[in-house]
Image: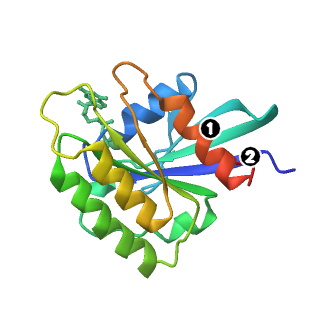
């Protein structure tokens, strides 16, 4: 079995994608200056149902600031993490826009919708609403907090299970 899984984090600027990446990888975190897109990578081994799996994360290098950018490199990943912050309805609605860009780029992969920054008090998107939306799209769903490390490893493990059809 190929045990290297490439997983990309997508979402609006400042939702917390890089913070999730750093929390998960917490070791090698490099930025390749030659790449203008999907420039940041990190790798970590985890156990999924007793199988050792290496997760390679593709984080964005800030190009998500622009409304449209090329998502076709994502054809080469195994799974997607769609990130919004629970404190911003706009960032949640931004997921709809991202989904239409993914469809245009013909990218269809096992996906988990992830709400982050659950430590903040000004929540604008409820767990139930986001879970229902994820379900309607056939996505997995989780809420995480990079400040406290809550649910970060579990999120990647559940996506890995889905990719490997080990659910
Ligand atoms: N309170 C809180 N702040 C967070 C959390 N995750 C990220 N942030 C902050 O949100 C800002 C944007 O995070 P970043 O990872 O750079 O977002 P990116 O643009 O999506 O990569 C930074 O100031 C982070 O420190 C979280 O779980 N809780
Ligand atoms: Mg970032």
Using the image, determine if residue 87 lies above or below residue 9: above
- Image quarter for ligand 1 equals top left
* Residue 16 shown left or right of residue 8 in the figure: left
55 relative position to 114: left or right? right
Spot occupied by residue 78 in the image (x, y as percentages of width and height): 64, 58
Q: Which residue is painted at 58% across and 27% down in the image?
A: 28
Q: For the image shown, how many numbered marks are present on the structure?
A: 2
Q: Indicate whether 29 appears above or below 70.
A: above
Dot 1: what SS?
A: helix
Q: Position of residue 89 (x, y in %)?
A: 17, 52
Mark toward the viewer: 1 or 2: 1
User: 22 left or right of 90?
Assistant: right
Q: Give the structural element (helix, strand or loop) at label 2.
A: strand
**Left or right side of 52 for 16:** left
User: Which residue position holds label 1?
Assistant: 157
Say which mark, if any, is on residue 4: 2
Is the residue under label 2 in contact with that under label 1 (CB below 8 Å)? no
Check the image and name the residue furthest to the left: 122
The residue positioned 46% from the left and 77% from the top of the image is 105
User: Mark 1 CB in 8 Å range of ligand 1?
Assistant: no
For this rendering, which residue is in front, 119 or 5?
119
x and y, in percent, of residue 143 in the image: 38, 38
Q: Residue furthest top?
A: 148
- Say which of 43 and 46 sits in front: 46
Task: Answer few, some or many: residues within 10 Å of disc 1's Cα (few below 14, many 20 plus, some between 14 and 19).
Answer: some
Q: For the view shown, which residue lies furthest in the right direction?
A: 1
Q: Position of residue 137 (x, y in %)?
A: 44, 67
Observer-nearest residue: 91 or 151? 151
Residue nearest the viewer, comparing 5 with 121: 121
Instruction: Calculate the distance from the C-alpha at mark 1 to the C-alpha at mark 2.
Output: 13 Å
């Amino acid at each position: 079995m190929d045990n290297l899984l490439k997983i990309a984090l997508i979402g609006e600027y400042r939702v917390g994608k890089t913070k999730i990446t750093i929390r998960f990888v917490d070791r090698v975190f490099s930025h390749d200056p030659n790449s203008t897109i999907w420039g940041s990578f990190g790798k970590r081994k985890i156990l999924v149902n007793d199988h050792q799996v290496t997760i390679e994360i593709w984080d964005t290098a800030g190009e998500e600031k622009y409304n449209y950018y090329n998502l076709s490199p994502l054809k080469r990943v195994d799974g997607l993490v769609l990130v919004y912050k629970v404190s911003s309805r706009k960032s949640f609605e931004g997921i709809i826009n991202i989904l239409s860009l993914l469809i245009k780029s013909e990218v269809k992969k096992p996906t988990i919708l992830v709400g982050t920054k659950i430590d903040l008090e000004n929540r604008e998107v409820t767990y139930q609403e986001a879970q229902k939306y994820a379900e309607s799209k056939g996505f997995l769903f989780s809420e995480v907090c990079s400040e406290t490390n809550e649910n970060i490893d579990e999120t990647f493990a559940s996506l890995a299970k889905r990719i490997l059809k080990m659910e």
